[in-house]
Image: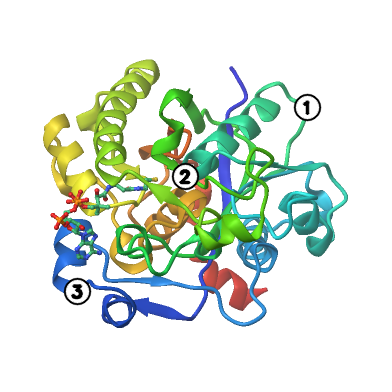
Amino acid sequence: MTRRADIVGWGKYVPSRVLTNADLAQMVDTNDEWITSRTGIKERRIRGEGETTTTMAVAAAREALTVAGMDAAELDLIVVANSSPDYLLPAPANFVQHELGASCPAFTIAAGCSGFVYSLVTAGQFIATGVYRNVLVIGVELISYAIDYTDRGTCILFGDGAAAVVLQPSEDGAGLMAFELGSDGGQAHHLWVPGGGTVNPISQDVVDKREHYIRMNGQEVFKFAVRKLSTCLRNITSQAGVNPADLDLIIPHQANLRIIETAARTLDLPLDKFFVNVHKYGNTSAASIPLALVEAIEEGRLKPGDTTAMIAFGSGLSWAGAVVRMGEAVARATPQEQVALA
Ligand SMILES: CC(C)(COP(=O)(O)OP(=O)(O)OC[C@H]1O[C@@H](n2cnc3c(N)ncnc32)[C@H](O)[C@@H]1OP(=O)(O)O)[C@@H](O)C(=O)NCCC(=O)NCCS
């Protein structure tokens, strides 16, 4: 049997600072009713004093290691999904590895909101080949640094956060069953940061034009998202030999409740099959899928033997989906209880 990557530990970290719709209404021309009806978002978390991409990632990772009953020194690999690094060089994975006290290789995958599923699948290949046994995958985003808080079309959507999983080869067939990774770079300009890279390096002009912030064509991204949620789910479930209706839970990228509702209608699936926490955190990009996964486990929505599909989409434009069967580990206590016991 192929060695599948099984989720044996999980953890999350979100900043305590809350930015509500009412707060945003003080900053730009918007209101709670508009944001709630168009997106389902009520509040999001924004980094506080001293919080960085690395500190958030490390906090989530420590919790995941505790649940897995593993020391950082036992890790064989760390993969960090991130598009909001502490510095341009080196990538966050190196800082995270050092802070955790691990001595294994570590690298970062920058695939926007699809980054966590890309990273999970990448990590899964190292486990499938038998090269590595203990792999930590983190999705972390301090995306508020790239948000223009004078642009009401984008600033209402995003928030900061981190979540992590520990993977190990399964003994019983649980773990990563099927996946699809995708990219359509022809649509890159629909969701991008036009300034600050090598084509348009940071300068006073770039800053004056606010080109160092995220620019988005919301309607195009919306259409892409609904299309990809539906087609990717059909593709990965067919690959896994599972009927979409038989999935125990679907974990979609938490970008906008309307995207999830529209996809549910397209797929003819009940909305309660989709895990939703976008109202609490907004779109946390690479942290969105793992934050939802961790909360689903903590809330008892995923039990041993359950099958879930995670589907992400985002800048690139990119998409990524994975079908995972949950192993025995999810029967354990919540991370909070584990941390208290440690
Ligand atoms: C951004 C998004 C919520 C906008 O919703 P929408 O229904 O498409 O709204 P539109 O862009 O058509 O704008 C409609 C009107 O609302 C206005 N508007 C935009 N943002 C607003 C806000 N925060 N508050 C109040 N009005 C707003 C627009 O200016 C426009 O006004 P106009 O008709 O006078 O020109 C929606 O397009 C979306 O969620 N897209 C996907 C974005 C996404 O998920 N990105 C990340 C993917 S990883």
Give the residue type that dot 1 points to.
Answer: Val
Residue 10 visible in this rendered orientation of the protein: no
Residue 27 spot, x, y in % from top left: 34, 78
Q: Nearer the viewer, residue 69 or 269?
A: 269
Name the residue rendered at 58%, 69% in the picture.
338
Give yes or no for contact between labels 3 and 1 (Cβ–Cβ under 8 Å): no
> What residue does disc 1 label?
131
Residue 290 appears left or right of 85: left
Give the residue type that dot 3 points to.
Answer: Asp
Q: Looking at the image, is mark 3 or mark 1 earlier in the sequence?
A: 3
Question: For numbered disc 3, what is the local secondary structure?
Answer: helix
Q: In which quadrant will I find the C terminus? A: bottom right
Looking at this rendering, what residue extends furthest in the right direction? 103
Ligand 1 within 8 Å of disc 2? The answer is: yes
Give yes or no for contact between labels 3 and 2 (Cβ–Cβ under 8 Å): no
Residue 15 numbered mark, or none? none
Task: Give the Cα separation between the discs numbered 3 and 2.
Answer: 25 Å
Give the residue type that dot 2 points to.
Answer: Cys
Q: In which quadrant will I find the N terminus? A: top right
Q: In this rendering, which labeled residue sits more in front, label 3 or label 2?
A: 3
Figure quadrant, ligand 1: bottom left
Name the residue rendered at 30%, 43% in the picture.
249
Residue 329 appears left or right of 151: right
Residue 34 spot, x, y in % from top left: 16, 66
Name the residue rendered at 44%, 23% in the picture.
186
Task: Give the Cα separation between the discs numbered 3 and 1.
Answer: 50 Å
Name the residue rendered at 84%, 45% in the picture.
104
> What residue does disc 2 label?
113
Q: Looking at the image, is mark 2 or mark 1 earlier in the sequence?
A: 2
